């Protein structure tokens, strides 16, 4: 029989997507107010792997990742997605998002993203929020699944996640 144990705290990550540098900066500030000090902010990367967001958000989209100094307890982690949904709505114009805010977390074994959409590989966690393991860590590197978004499979993203994973290791000591 297995014995339940208290889960390890995890590292909050947030991916932002926008073509408006001012809004991106304002969103970073709002996220810092909501979740605490940012300890890693990636450079902006061109988002060219999909045109999924263009109809709503326009072209020339840039992706940026943030991580936060404070580690999260898994019991209430779904609340992050509820909060970022409110921020997306706050920054929207004419009912359309101008910034996409994708929260998740990483620990030593995986990178998890949150969604409001159910699918075969997503698990319901609470209050209409689902979680998916987007990448798994094995053999000293991040590896993808068949459902992993194309941009998350890219080496530059994985390099950013390696940096954030190192920060997590330091914070977990």
Image (cartoon, grey):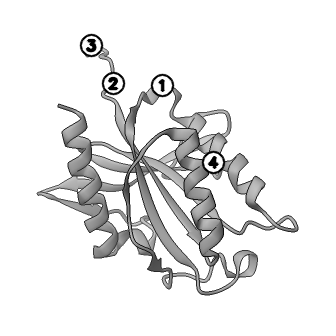
Closer to the camera: disc 4 or disc 2?
Answer: 4
Query: Percent x, y for residue 157?
Result: 34, 69
- Among the two numbered marks 4 and 3 on one chain, the one whose residue lies closer to the N terminus: 3
The reply to whether the C-beta atoms of the residues labelled 3 and 2 are less than 8 Å apart is no
Say which residue appears at 54% left-offset and 63% top-offset. Answer: 16
Q: CA distance from mark 1 to mark 2?
A: 9 Å
Q: CA distance from mark 4 to mark 1?
A: 17 Å
Closer to the camera: disc 3 or disc 1?
Answer: 1
Which type of secondary structure does the marked residue at label 3 adopt? loop
Neighbours of disc 1 within 10 Å: few (<14), some (14-19), many (20+): few
The reply to whether the C-beta atoms of the residues labelled 4 and 2 are less than 8 Å apart is no
Neighbours of disc 3 within 10 Å: few (<14), some (14-19), many (20+): few
Report which residue position mark 1 lands on.
Answer: 75
Residue situated furthest right in the rendering: 94
Q: CA distance from mark 3 to mark 2?
A: 12 Å
Report which residue position mark 3 lands on.
Answer: 3
- Among the two numbered marks 4 and 1 on one chain, the one whose residue lies closer to the N terminus: 1
**How many numbered circles are shown?**
4
- Among the two numbered marks 3 and 1 on one chain, the one whose residue lies closer to the N terminus: 3
Q: Mark on residue 84?
A: 4
- Among the two numbered marks 4 and 2 on one chain, the one whose residue lies closer to the N terminus: 2
Q: Is residue 165 left or right of residue 78?
A: left
Report which residue position mark 2 lands on.
Answer: 7
Q: CA distance from mark 4 to mark 2?
A: 23 Å
Q: Is 59 placed above or below 39 here?
A: below
Q: CA distance from mark 4 to mark 3?
A: 34 Å
The reply to whether the C-beta atoms of the residues labelled 1 and 2 are less than 8 Å apart is yes
């Amino acid at each position: 029989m297995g014995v339940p144990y208290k889960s390890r705290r995890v590292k909050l990550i947030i991916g932002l997507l926008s073509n408006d540098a001012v809004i991106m900066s304002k969103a970073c500030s709002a996220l810092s107010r909501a979740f605490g000090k940012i300890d890693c902010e990636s450079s902006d990367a061109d988002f060219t792997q999909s045109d999924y967001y263009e109809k709503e958000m326009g072209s020339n989209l840039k992706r940026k990742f943030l991580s936060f100094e404070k580690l999260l307890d898994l019991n209430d982690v779904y609340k992050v997605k509820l909060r970022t949904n409110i921020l997306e709505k706050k920054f929207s114009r004419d009912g359309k998002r101008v910034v996409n805010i994708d929260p998740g977390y990483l620990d030593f074994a995986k990178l998890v993203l949150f969604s409001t959409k159910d699918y075969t590989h997503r698990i319901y966690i609470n209050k209409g929020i689902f979680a998916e393991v987007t990448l798994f860590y094995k053999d000293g590197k991040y590896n993808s699944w068949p459902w992993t978004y194309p941009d998350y499979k890219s080496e530059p993203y994985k390099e950013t996640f390696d940096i954030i994973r190192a920060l997590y290791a330091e914070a977990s000591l």
